[in-house]
Image (cartoon, grey):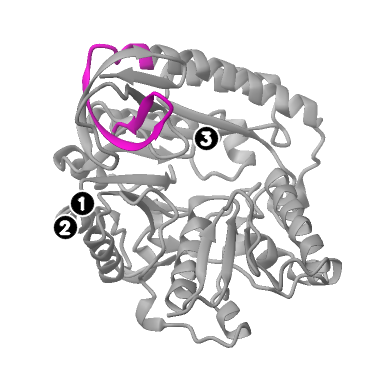
Amino acid sequence: MKAKGVVDVITLGCSKNLVDSELLMRQFEVLGYKVRHDAENPDGKIVVVNTCGFIGDAKEESINTILQFAQLRKEQKIDKLFVMGCLSERYLTELKTELPEVDRFYGKFNYTEILKELGQEYRADLRLERKLSTAPHYAYVKISEGCNRTCSYCAIPIITGKHRSRTMDDIVDEVKKLTSQGVKEFQLIAQDLSYYGLDRYKELKLAELLQRLSDLRGVEWLRLHYAYPAHFPYDILPVMKERDNVCRYLDIALQHISNNMLRKMRRNISKEKTLELLSRIREEVPGIHLRTTMLLGHPGETQEDVDELKDFIRDMRFERLGAFAFSNEEGTFAYDHYEDNIPQEEKQRRVDEVMALQQSISSEINEAKIGQRLKVIIDRQESDYYIGRTEFDSPEVDPEVLIPCSVPGIRIGDFYESMITGAAEFDLYGI
């Protein structure tokens, strides 16, 4: 088939957006287009920008990226410019008015209509197929859309709507397709993994889904991203403990620990319940690595709240932790009910305090791994090192294992047992 032209797809934001881009890219590919993702110098005749609209910094990046390509469209250096994703779902009317250079805006869920705009038909028979933008041995698998939580600061339910679980059969079929292509590692993602199944099956089904996926031939690692602490699905813990291919890793965003802030954030959980939850997780899954996120500078947060949070972080010693500053988002409970009266500089100072604390904890946790033998998957080669990850490390966000290229017999995409010989703040060294 003769190529119809080059399509450049630019993805901003989270891995859930990345999955949408990969689904769309596969459709373009089958139709005969040459497709590139996040190219260093995107200059295709068709450009698709998949936007993020979560917080201020993400919105600014999305707007700047659109403006960059709008100028190229104005100069007729590209033929078509389409914008999709969270930002255009949230601000569709405003964007249409402000950016007439964009040919069409699409939201979070109607982006396949881009094909119709180009006179092409969407191939429903390929709805589970993707053109992977990641390394070919791992993939993200989105198990649901939307969120039913009502956290004060979060605009995601405004953008994505209520929680909608995919069927287990659909997810199993997608993973089977990916394993047949050589994918070995799967990051299960959702805005709220904990809620999976409740809307569709009237009960929580994440544990059953994990069991079904871990039974599939070719699935070597399954990793969980974005659990919610309230109404946590405890039945996943025995599965994680008993199944070798379910990673002892959990991404669970806690956001804060003081009861004052948990109430103001509308998190539906107390400090006491949070401590019980974390204790049970670590007791039932020995060696588990927890990734969490903290939100600093929310209206009503005092220095006492920050100090309480820092004490909590010292005590819990999270293996992975990130922090971000409160962003006052239109339409949220916080925007309508609280005064955003903490200066941005102070918000960032609090974030920096927390991250400095975590840096020292991460260094100590990494140093404790020296001398251990760990299973590592090799992602790529950079300069004099092969770069890999353990089961405790998700792509892009977690520490990596650097193995000298002088070590014989190593191939990208394969698993190895590596002896950890050294540690830095956020990375390990092995042989």
Look at the image and say whether residue 136 sits in the magenta stretch.
Answer: no
Query: Which of these two is toward me, 176 or 378?
Result: 378
Find numbered disc 1 in the image and state the secondary structure of the residue it sits on.
loop
Compare residues 260 and 26 and report the one nearer the observer: 26
What is the number of callouts on the image?
3
Q: Residues within 10 Å of mark 3 (few under 14, many from 20)?
A: some
Circles 3 and 2: CB atoms closer than 8 Å: no
Residue range (magenta): 366-390
Q: CA distance from mark 3 to mark 2?
A: 31 Å
Q: Main secondary structure of the magenta part?
A: strand
The residue carrying pointer 2 sits among few (fewer than 14), some (14 to 19) or many (20 or more) residues within 10 Å by Cα, namely: few
Q: Is residue 349 left or right of residue 126?
A: right
Which residue in the protein does label 3 denote?
Answer: 293
In percent of the image, x 71 and y 22: which residue is there? 349
Tag 3 and tag 1, C-beta contact below 8 Å: no
Q: Which residue: 37% across, 25% down?
A: 385
* 118 vs 140: above or below: below
